[in-house]
Image: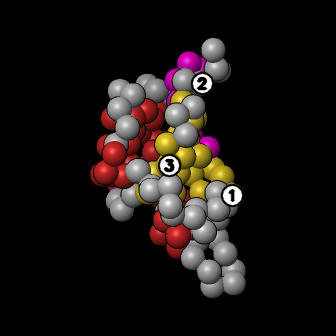
Amino acid sequence: MSYYQRHVFFCLNQRSNGEASCADHDAQAAFDHCKSRVKQLGLAGKDGVRVNKAGCLDRCAGGPVAVVYPEAVWYSWVDQSDIDEIVESHLRDGQVVERLVLPDSVGR
């Protein structure tokens, strides 16, 4: 068994060369909101959920992006209500939010 039931990585990368990056879509605010909701719902910590910052995850064209392990589900979102849905449906209840899943064809 893993130390955490689920591990979420939010890309917070900011490119300085003008290329698209997740930071352009306020990924930091989404990360902060997710971390807060996970704590509020009592999901944080051992046997629960860990929310982490990540550098470039190389899926910039779909940004902002986050990935949930161990399922390896990639998400993109528009606003905080999308983050709430990911937290409540996937992280808490184990149900993937299909409408927010990033298609495999989306890369950099």
Q: Residues within 10 Å of mark 2 (few under 14, many from 20)?
A: some
Secondary structure at badge 3 equals: strand
The spot of residue 11 in percent (x, y) is 59, 57
**Which quadrant: the N terminus?**
top right
Q: Is residue 60 above or below residue 74?
A: below
Mark closest to the chain's N terminus, 2 or 1:
2
Q: Dot 2 corresponds to which residue?
A: 4
Quadrant in the rendering for residue 23: bottom right
Which numbered dot is residue 47?
none
**Which kind of residue does numbered mark 1 sit on?**
Gly
Q: Give the range drawn in magenta.
A: 46-52
> Marks 3 and 1: CB-CB under 8 Å?
no
In this view, the residue farthest toward the front is 105
Residue 75 appears at what percent x and percent y? 45, 51
Q: Which mark is residue 74?
A: 3
Q: How crowded is mark 3: few (under 14 residues within 10 Å), some or many (20 or more)?
A: many
Residue 86, located in which quarter of the rendered image? top left
Camera-side mark, 3 or 1: 3
Local secondary structure at mark 2: loop
The residue at which mark 1 appears reads as: 55
Q: Residue at the spot x=64%, y=57% of the render?
A: 57
* The C terminus sits in image quarter: bottom right
SS at badge 1: loop
